[in-house]
Amino acid sequence: MRLVHIADTHLGFSAYSKVEPQDGVNQREQDIYDAFEQAVDKAIALKPDIVVHAGDLFDNVRPQNRAIDIALRQLIRLSESGIETVLISGNHSTPRMRETSSIFRIFEHLKHVHPVHRAGCERIVVGDLTVHAVPHSASPPLVEVLGQVAPSRETKLNMLLLHAGILGSNTYKMDEFNEQAVPIDALSHGWDYIALGHYHEHKRILDRGFYSGSTERLGFGEIGQKKGIVEVELETARTVFHELEIREMVELGPLDASGLASSEVVNEARRVISSAPLEERIARLVIRNVSAEAYRSLDSSTIRRLGSSALHFELKVDSVESDGAASSTSDMQIGLLADEFRRYVAGLDLPDSRKNLLMEIGIPYLEKVQE
């Protein structure tokens, strides 16, 4: 019996200020949608018995209409292909208040699609397989829920579907607000497969336990990570990672500026940037050990212009004070503030017209501060 394991698609995520010229959609938001569609393409082509999505289908509790439309279209494709699909809510898409309805309810009418969002464990039987689906939960905590979950004797095969960080000799967390983490010992043995979501890098945690990783990179902390989906042969535990083609993310440097004057720092930055193809890529240049004197006169705006061919170019400068103490400035601080503002507005319970107005008013202020 074969399954496809997907997780952390984060539909609705957006970043930076570039938009598609055709329809004005944030370019990174569109990248996220394209990666999800590509993942579904691969899943359908593999013709598995079941597809499982291990959480964070959406990037926030109240996704905008476009993200909902994309999710519905792709889940309908799986439904029309006759593929049983089980998806659980993750910490990004689970309401913090019980009285807030889950967006997952809109999928309940789709044939072959099994959305699981209520705290606890829901069991879905597909042929000889029982899927023990455990969505994100803060109350009761996941470790308490897992203490009551065990493989079923009624089917030949059993798998655990879980969205959580794992604590152990190697800790796998995202250090996000509202995340839940469980000790590795809480994952009882006897499972034919454990499909995990939340940690964004594809990792093997246990003999038969894997994070599939996210389908796109959501920050420079994920640079160099391959993104994709996992194909699993349950009887043999054989897994194959199918990589997705996504936008490149490039780390330039780090450039060591020890002993360099400000003009020399700019020249070195020009050399490093000109040697790397940046067109349509996401890039960051880190400059370290800039003296206090050089830092005060550093023409950082020229360095940023040198990277203007990139979809997004980020400059991070680490300076050394006269007393030897280090300090750091980064475009990422402002960039993250703008991104958090977008995500905050996207999660508001407001019509899209009001959200767009808030974006139009708020983002220029943040960009003006950055300039």
Image (tube, helix red, strand yellow):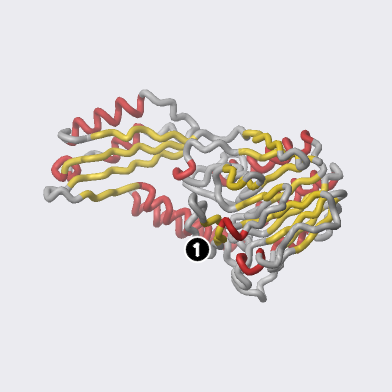
Residue 30, quarter of picture: top right
Residue 87 placement (x, y as % from top left): 72, 54
- The reply, left or right, for residue 162 in relation to residue 360 is right
Of 54 and 299, the residue lying toward us: 54
Residue 357 placement (x, y as % from top left): 54, 60
- The reply, left or right, for residue 223 in relation to residue 260 is right
- Residue 351 visible in this rendered orientation of the protein: no
The image shows residue 119, relative to residue 225, as above or below, that is below
Residue at disc 1, secondary structure: loop
Residue 92 placement (x, y as % from top left): 59, 59
- For the point 48% across and 51% down, the residue is 169
**Count of numbered circles on the image:** 1
Of 260 and 280, the residue lying toward us: 260
- The reply, left or right, for residue 113 in relation to residue 366 is right
Residue 226, quarter of picture: top right
Of 339 and 367, the residue lying toward us: 339
- For the point 58% across and 63% down, the residue is 347
- Quarter occupied by the N terminus: top right
- For the point 59% across and 55% down, the residue is 59
- Residue 35 visible in this rendered orientation of the protein: yes
Q: Residues within 10 Å of mark 1 (few under 14, many from 20)?
A: few
The amino acid beneath tag 1 is Phe
The image shows residue 323, relative to residue 256, as above or below, that is below
- For the point 34% across and 33% down, the residue is 253
Name the residue beneath numbered marker 1. 177
